[in-house]
C-alpha cells in the first residue's frame, strides 16, 4: 500500500514516515500544500494523509484540487483544529476521515487500515478479465464458462488483483485485503497461495493470468 503524507511539521512528517514504513507501507512525503497537491494528482496512491494548515496552499484547497480531478483516493485529514464545522467542511468536500492532533499512532494506523479496506469497495458487482469472471457478491469465479473452486484466501487475493487489472498489487496490499494482523509479513504464505491460485485458474489453458513483478508484487495481466 502506497501512502502520501502532506505535512509541514518535519518532526511529525518523519515520525509518520518511519512508523508507517516499519508497518510495511510505501511512503512518500511533501512539506507544503502546493507540492502536495501536485504529487497527489500526478501519482497513484492508496491513501493520502493531509495536514489542514499548510504553507503555500491549505489542506482544504489541496483536497479540492484532488477531488476536482475525480481522484477517489481516500484522504485522511490531520488538524489541530477540533471544530465540528471544520470537520464537516472537509467531509462534505470528499475527505474520508478527520483526526485531531495530537493523536496516538495506533489509532491512526487503525483508521488507515479501515480506509484501505473501504477503498476496495466497488459499484460493479462483476469483474471480468478476458474469459475470467468474478462475482464479488457471491464470491464465485468462472473461467472459460466453467466454475473454479477457490478457498476464501485464494478468492480474496484474486479479487484484490482483479479490481486493479494491469496494476501491480504489493504484498502489503494483499496482506491488508486477505489477512488480519496476526500474519507474519515475512512468511511465504502469500507465495504459496499464489501458486495454488495459478494452478486453479490456469488449469487447461496456455493463458497466464498472474504475473510476478520481482521486488514489487503481482498483477493480473491482460492477454498474456
Image: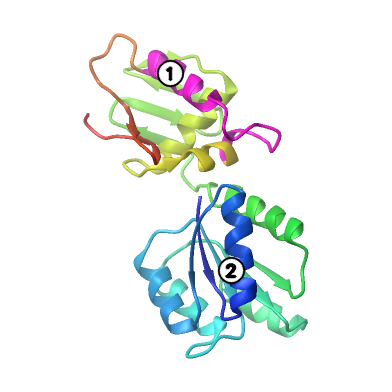
Q: Quadrant of the C terminus?
A: top left
Residue at image point 48% right, 34% down: 159
SS under mark 2: helix
**Tag in front: 2 or 1:** 2
Q: Nearer the viewer, residue 49 or 149?
A: 49
- Residue at the bottom extreme, as displayed: 56
Residue 195 position (above or below residue 156) = above
Instruction: Identify the mark nearer the N-term, 2 or 1.
Output: 2
Q: Quadrant of residue 71?
A: bottom left
Residue at image point 54% right, 31% down: 156
Residue at image point 57% right, 27% down: 187
Residue 218 visible in this rendered orientation of the protein: yes
How far across and how far down the image is residue 34, in percent?
A: 43, 83
Characterize the local packing of mark 2: few (<14), some (14-19) or many (20 or more) Cα atoms within 10 angstroms.
Answer: some
- For the image, the number of numbered tags is 2
SS under mark 1: helix
Residue 118 visible in this rendered orientation of the protein: no
Q: Main secondary structure of the magenta part?
A: helix
Q: Is residue 199 magenta?
A: yes
How far across and how far down the image is residue 75, in percent?
A: 56, 66
Residue matched to label 1: 195
How far across and how far down the image is residue 122, in percent?
A: 50, 47
Residue matched to label 2: 14
Highlighted range, magenta: 177-201
* Left or right: 25 as drawn, with respect to 85: left
Characterize the local packing of mark 1: few (<14), some (14-19) or many (20 or more) Cα atoms within 10 angstroms.
Answer: few
Q: Quadrant of residue 198?
A: top left
How far across and how far down the image is residue 172, in percent?
A: 53, 42
Residue 154 position (above or below residue 36) = above
Amino acid at each position: 500500500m502506497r501512502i502520501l503524507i502532506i505535512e509541514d511539521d518535519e518532526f511529525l512528517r518523519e515520525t509518520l514516515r518511519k512508523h508507517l514504513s516499519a508497518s510495511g507501507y510505501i511512503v512518500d512525503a511533501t512539506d507544503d500544500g502546493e507540492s502536495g497537491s501536485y504529487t497527489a494528482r500526478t501519482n497513484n496512491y492508496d491513501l493520502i494523509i493531509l495536514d489542514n494548515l499548510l504553507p503555500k496552499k491549505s489542506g482544504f484547497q489541496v483536497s479540492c484540487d484532488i477531488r476536482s480531478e475525480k481522484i477517489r483516493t481516500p484522504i485522511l485529514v490531520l488538524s489541530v483544529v477540533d471544530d465540528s464545522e471544520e470537520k464537516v467542511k472537509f467531509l462534505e468536500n470528499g475527505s474520508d476521515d478527520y483526526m485531531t492532533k495530537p493523536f496516538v499512532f495506533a489509532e491512526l494506523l487503525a483508521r488507515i487500515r479501515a480506509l484501505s479496506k473501504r477503498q476496495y469497495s466497488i459499484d460493479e458487482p462483476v469483474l471480468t478479465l478476458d474469459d475470467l469472471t468474478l462475482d464479488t457478491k457471491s464470491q464465485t469465479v468462472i473461467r472459460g464458462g466453467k466454475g473454479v473452486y477457490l478457498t476464501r484466501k485464494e478468492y480474496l487475493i484474486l479479487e484484490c488483483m482483479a479490481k486493479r487489472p494491469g496494476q501491480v498489487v504489493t504484498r502489503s496490499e494483499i496482506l491488508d485485503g486477505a489477512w488480519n494482523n496476526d500474519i507474519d509479513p515475512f512468511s511465504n504464505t502469500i507465495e504459496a497461495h499464489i501458486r495454488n491460485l495459478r494452478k486453479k485458474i490456469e488449469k487447461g489453458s496456455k493463458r497466464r493470468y498472474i504475473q510476478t513483478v520481482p521486488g514489487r508484487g503481482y498483477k493480473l495481466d491482460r492477454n498474456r
